[in-house]
Image (spheres, rainbow, N blue to C red):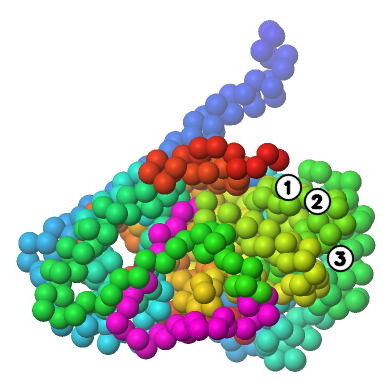
Amino acid sequence: MEWLSRVVERVPFLKSLLLWFICRVAQMGPVPGHVAFIMDGNRRYARQRNQKVVLGHREGGIKLQEMLDSCEALGIHTVTAFAFSLDNFKRSQQEVDDLLNLAVEKLTDNLPELVTKTRVKLFGDVSRVPPNLLRLLEKAAKDSEHIKSSTLNLCFSYTSTNEMMRATRKMVDACAKGTLTENDIDPISFESFLDSSECIEPDVVIRTSGEVRLSDFCLWQTMSSCIYFCQALWPDFSVLHLFLSIIHYQQNFDVIQQRRKTMKRFKESFRSEVDPKTRKCRIQKKDK
Amino acid sequence: VSLMASPPGVVARLFHIPITLVLVCVYNVIHASYSLLKRALQIKFALIHLYDQLFTTITLSELRQKGKTLSQSPKHLAIVLDSESLCLSKLATVVVWALGVGIRNITLHDIDGKLKGDQKDFLKFLEHEERKLFRGSSAPQLVVRPSPADIVSKKSPQEVLCDIQNKPQEGTVAYDETNSDYFHLTFTCARDSTDAMATCIEKLVSASKDGILSSEDIDIQMIDNILTSQSGSKIPDPDFILKLDQNMVQAGLLPWQTRYSEIMQAQCSLSSLSFSSFWNCLEYYSRRNKRFGK
């Protein structure tokens, strides 16, 4: 598979033909509306080629742009990308600075064109984002507010536990101000305070580089998502891998819909008592 | 004459039908191959299971020996099951294997909570399997922990205050991972995940109204204490999730607690899970390397 991807990458005509073919085949069945990427493997990619780590991240940035184009061609209207975790601040200062500078450079080059066709949103703890980067992202978010056709959620300075903590703080504040009552507190209202409040849940979460965990990424939002773990490192991730992830999604489509309904039922029935034997909801404890 | 007048439209339509047919064929072949591969794997694991049942017996000393060979063993194993095909006796066997290998914290999760409803029946099977394996030796004592939603909802104001202040409650015994006299079993369902978080927020709102804290005081440690500690004592979060529901779709398992858990789908169902397949999953886990973002 990896050799096929490398051959395809080298021949632009083959790449376009493959993308056309993949789009047509994939669209014979259900295509995910929202794909989330955990873009792992940039450093290993660089080390494999005896290059500096920052070059691996640079390749990773190029790959993200390419995947956005492929998703657009496939009809995937929402993409969430885990660009920088709060945990990544634990890396060496040199690497963190390189990453942040690279992010500024990439966003400066690509955002002006991106915001003309994609709504850009920032998920993450803005207090930890460097001011110059934050200005870029906030401007991009503002300039692309009106676009409804496709969305890019950029998770920067983000972990899911941090997101849930911030949502909790907002709810406590809202209760203190009186805009939310205690009776209004339920899983549905909690979701409305998350960074992802305006988005649908991811249909597929793709993690590259062979790791098999979510690493504190969109934990609440992915409670009924399909997970696809890919061996390829992120810069090696190709449209073929994306196609396989869509096949994987189509194979699990019925299960996803069923689990989504179950989760929705549970979230909506927070205050209902549950019969311990049948596990069905009995009565409403409190009126909303 | 009318055909000759608009050849491009007709030509395009003529090519469109065979191209679509080819694409439909390719789509169906890909999915049929995928399903065939899955079926072949299920047959392979069913045969391995049959062989194991006929020719292999596992003793406690073998399990203990094997457990020592793992470079890293999960401190807390979460097993995700298919609500529609629960086999309680087989599940009890799997739990007993995990105990024999040295795992002391096990969470059994199915999305609908059917296992929670059949908890009493399951515990009877578990007792029977334990007696079979541990005969003579003392089996670790079972402690059934309440689900996270029950833990959070039943916390007293005093307990919540200790969680907020990140102080252990007076008189509580901290969890000792070297103590092999006990093993903790938790039954969860997807509702526990959603209810636990909402109830945690209710507790914090209530504490805020009582003037104990403001929103800025809320941090990840505080929420973690409320969600995971019971009477001041915490067991480790699940570090290995073994999916026996035959798909890679999340089943609403404790999102907060499983943020760094390794996830593995066993390629077979619960009923055809042999010890060698289970052992392969544990060996797979032992080879994982966690970086925590570094």
Residue at 62 percent of width and 24 percent of height? B13
Q: Which residue is mark 2?
A: A180
Residue type at mark 1 is Asp
- The residue mark sitting in front, 3 or 2, is 2
The quarter in which the C terminus of chain A is drawn is top right
Alpha-carbon distance for marks 3 and 2?
30 Å
Q: Residues within 10 Å of mark 2 (few under 14, many from 20)?
A: some
Say which label, 3 or 2, has the lower sequence index.
Answer: 3
- Looking at the rendering, which quadrant does residue B74 occupy? bottom left
Mark 1 vs mark 3: tell me if same chain: yes
Q: What amino acid type should be assigned to the residue bearing mark 2?
A: Leu
Identify the chain of the residue marked 3, using the numbered disc in the image: A
Nearer to us in this view, A271 or A251: A271
SS at circle 2: loop
**What is the C-alpha distance between the residues marked 1 and 2?**
6 Å
- B20 sits left or right of A235 in the view: left
Taking the image as shown, residue B29 lies to the left or right of residue A223, namely: left
The mark that comes first in sequence, 1 or 3, is 3
The answer to whether residue A87 of the structure is visible from this angle is no
For the residues bearing labels 1 and 2, Cβ distance under 8 angstroms: yes
Rendered residue at 75%/91% (across/down): A93
Q: Which chain's residue wears label 1?
A: A
Q: Nearer the viewer, mark 1 or mark 3?
A: 1
Q: Which mark is residue A184?
A: 1
Return the mark for residue A137. 3
Q: Amino acid at mark 3?
A: Leu
Labels in figure, total: 3
- In magenta, the rendered stretch is B162-190
